[in-house]
Amino acid sequence: MASDDRNGLTTPDMVVLALLSEKPRHGYELNQELIRREVSDWAGISRAQVYYSVRKLHDDGLIREISGEPARGPLRTTYSTTEFGRAQLESALACDFWACQRPPQPFMTWIALSPYGKPAGKISVIRKRRQFLNAELKKERRTLEEIGDDATPLGEAARLLVSWVVQNMDQELLWLDQVEAVLGKGADHKPKAAEHAARPTRRKKRSAHR
């Protein structure tokens, strides 16, 4: 596994640094950008983490205050990335950590454990996954249309990212047909619970006959 040499920067730290490298912003604006760009789709970061990162980056000299009321917190203070902060971000982005990871997706974990599930339950999860992907695919295609022909570096990066997501979802939807065919074998069999429920009735009939 590749070493994680990101200068002590967490993913939220790097997102904040990137947004402040575009232009100065205060805490509220940072969170609005997270929502507008749907950052939660590609990076785990919450409102609380934004404010924590702002304080940490400021204390470490990676960002600086340029206006506002520091005593009242990051919500009212506008920050900008320092030269040192930009250098640290560039260095962290050159780390091979980004290229050599295989974070497990919950659905992949489910497949590995699926032999221990009931056929009907497997079919239910697979179809729920297909439903989820179709909804997400619709959203991502709409996002791709909104990006349009934006020729800025951020627009180009966003287009690459969303295009990759769309292609992967398309491929997974095709693959799910195979998953359902293999893992869903026996889904039409009578559930064991129903078989057990029928046994007492048969025993009662035998007793009555005697």
Image (cartoon, rainbow, N blue to C red):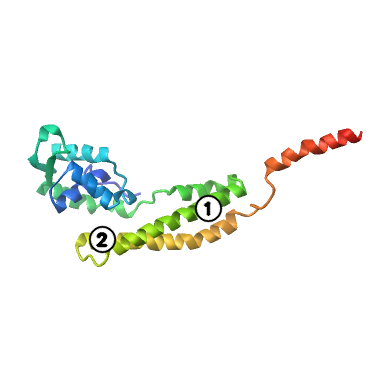
Residue 94 coordinates in the image, percent (x, y): 23, 54
Residue 57 figure quarter:
top left
Can residue 14 be seen here? no
Q: Residues within 10 Å of mark 2 (few under 14, many from 20)?
A: few
Residue found at the far bottom of this picture: 149
Number of labels in the image equals 2
What's the residue at 40%, 59% (across, down)? Answer: 137
* 73 vs 1: above or below: above
What's the residue at 32%, 51% (across, down)? Answer: 42
Q: Secondary structure at mark 2?
A: helix
Residue 58 coordinates in the image, percent (x, y): 14, 39
Find disc 1 in the rendering and name its residue: 126
Find disc 2 in the rendering and name its residue: 157
Residue 30 coordinates in the image, percent (x, y): 20, 46
Q: Secondary structure at mark 1?
A: helix
* 22 vs 144: above or below: above
Residue 48 figure quarter:
top left
Residue found at the far right of this picture: 210
* 5 vs 56: above or below: below
What's the residue at 34%, 51% (across, down)? Answer: 41
Residue 98 coordinates in the image, percent (x, y): 30, 52
Observer-nearest of 193 and 89: 193
Q: Residues within 10 Å of mark 1 (few under 14, many from 20)?
A: many
Q: For the residues marked 2 and 1, what is the alpha-carbon distance in whole angstroms? A: 32 Å
Q: Mark 2: which amino acid?
A: Ala
For residue 145, side relative to residue 199 (left or right): left
- Going from N to C along the chain, the mark reached first, 2 or 1, is 1
Using the image, tell me which numbered label, if any, was put on residue 66: none
